[in-house]
Image: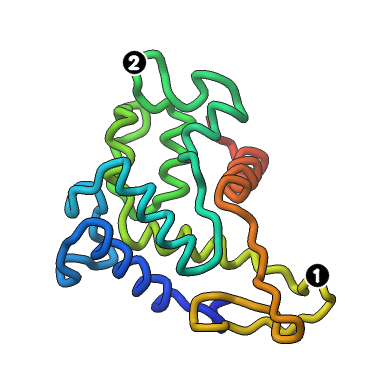
Amino acid sequence: MQDLIGKETVSREIKKALVETLRVGGARIGPETSIVKDLAAESLDFLDLNYRLEQAFGIRMARHFFLEHMEEMFGEGSAIDEKGRLTPRALAVLRARYPEATLPEPGAGIDMDEVPSLITVQAMTDTVMDILDTLPDRCSCGASAWRTQDGTHVVCGTCLRPATFTNGDDLTRQWLSGLSAGSNLP
């Protein structure tokens, strides 16, 4: 996918969406910028931001955060304990998903309300790239001639149908299943 839509294009679209959603100056936005801490985004802002990215790339962002998916897949209490803190398993998953984030030592815990502040522009770029990387080898017409229609929307070069990508929630569940199966998560 990177030869069709690269990280630079994704980062540029995220920056544009942040400027429009949060009405902040673009000079304040860099790869390590925390969308919550540095730009004061709130939960409703993420809905608007996700919508703008979905429109920009023809994708579907995750509707739920990985913590909710963990609770759904592995049972209540698997991600968030009764005090609203991340479990050791959730903290390990958080480290795997956001390796660049500064997190407390295992066992120290983190309040679940602190997690959104870890989402940076780079983390959001990686999320969009992960979805774009699910581009199938072939279109439903059988052709394998993908191209970008306008620099951000992928279409079949033969029939001009828009590409279909794995949605963000399904991708998160697949990632969690693979992480759980292939590691020694607590």
Looking at the image, residue 53 sits to the left or right of residue 71; the answer is: left
The colouring scheme, among rainbow, by chain, secondary structure or one colour, is rainbow
Q: Residue furthest top?
A: 82
Q: Nearer the viewer, mark 1 or mark 2?
A: 1
Frontmost residue, 94 versus 136: 136
Task: Using the image, determine if residue 148 lies above or below residue 101.
Answer: below
- Measured as percent of width and height from the top left, residue 74 is found at 60, 26
Looking at the image, residue 113 sits to the left or right of residue 77; the answer is: left
Three-letter amino acid code at disc 2?
A: Lys
| Res 3 quadrant in image | bottom right
- Measured as percent of width and height from the top left, residue 150 is found at 51, 83
Three-letter amino acid code at disc 1?
A: Ser
Q: Which mark is residue 140?
A: 1
Count of numbered badges drawn on the protein: 2
- Measured as percent of width and height from the top left, residue 109 is found at 32, 27
Task: Using the image, determine if residue 173 lies above or below residue 160.
Answer: above
Which residue is at a point 40% across and 61% down the rendered structure image?
Answer: 52
Which residue is at a point 58% across and 21% down the rendered structure image?
Answer: 75
Which residue is at a point 24% across and 67% down the rendered structure image?
Answer: 30
Provide the secondary structure element on which disc 2 rests.
loop
Q: Residues within 10 Å of mark 1 (few under 14, many from 20)?
A: few
- Alpha carbon of mark 1 to alpha carbon of mark 2: how far? 48 Å
Give the residue number, with chain letter if any, for mark 2: 83
Looking at the image, residue 182 sits to the left or right of residue 158; the answer is: left
Q: Which mark is residue 98?
A: none
- Measured as percent of width and height from the top left, residue 170 is found at 63, 47
Provide the secondary structure element on which disc 1 rests.
loop
Which residue is at a point 64% across and 78% down the rendered structure image?
Answer: 155
